[in-house]
Amino acid sequence: MRSWLRGYCLYLAWLIASFGLCTSFFYGEFLGISPCSLCWYQRMALFPLVVILAMALYRGDRGVVLYVLPLAAMGGLIGAFQILQRHFVFLQGPSVCKFGIQCSRSLVQVFGLIDFSWLSTIGFLMIFVLLIFSVSKQR
């Protein structure tokens, strides 16, 4: 089972990144919801992941993990900062979210609990774990 999963880790990471890309485009372009500046930084980490992982899948290159791991980590850290902003008032400065919606305001919620900042953080964390698992040595 582990070897099977290890063989599809890059593919699963690419699917998660592609889902995030499509969701981002849908809400931004079709629904007209402009993202905040922190969401733009997360997009800067997410969009290259889709392209780089697709190229790695096409070429069968697992060495790409070293290049995309920092992108997944940065996106996850920014998402975690957005979550912390909701709970700690001193992190909610006017300089953090200048454009678009405020991070402290939840526009879309899944099941009434999970908002975009949680979804993006979970997505980046899943990508990070899958990338680590894809290069871990089999015992």
Image (cartoon, rainbow, N blue to C red):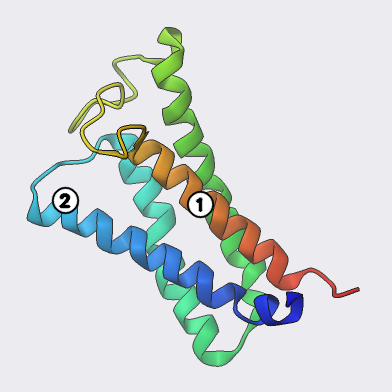
Q: Number of labelled discs?
A: 2
Circle 1 Cα neighbour tier, 10 Å, few/some/many (<14 / 14–19 / ≥20):
many
Give the residue at mark 2: 28
Q: Is residue 1 above or below residue 16?
A: below
In the image, farthest residue toward the front: 111
What's under tag 1, amino acid-wise? Phe
Label 1, label 2: how far apart the Cα atoms are: 19 Å
Kind of residue at badge 2: Gly
At x 44%, y 8%, the residue is 90
Q: Choose top left, top right, bottom left or bottom right for residue 133.
A: bottom right
Residue at the spot 42% in from the left edge and 38% down from the top edge: 118
Decide: is 70 above or below 54: above
User: Where residue 70 appears, x then y in whole percent?
Assistant: 59, 54
Picture quarter containing residue 8? bottom right
- Residue at the outermost bottom position: 59
**Residue count near mark 2 (Cα–Cα under 10 Å), binned few <14, some 14–19, many ≥20:** few
Q: Secondary structure at mark 2?
A: helix
Label for residue 96?
A: none
Q: Residue at x 35, y 52 (%)?
A: 43
Left or right of 44: which side holds 125? right
Query: Looking at the image, which residue is at 47% across and 52% down?
Result: 123
Q: Quadrant of residue 26?
A: bottom left
Tell me the quadrant of the picture where the C terminus can be found: bottom right
Residue 64, given in percent of the width and then of the height, sits at 62, 74
Q: Secondary structure at mark 1?
A: helix
Q: Is residue 120 depicted above or below 85 in this figure?
A: below
Lower sequence index among marks 1 and 2 = 2
The residue labelled by disc 1 is 124
The image position of residue 5, as x and y in percent, is: 66, 76
Asked if marks 1 and 2 touch (Cβ < 8 Å), the reply is no
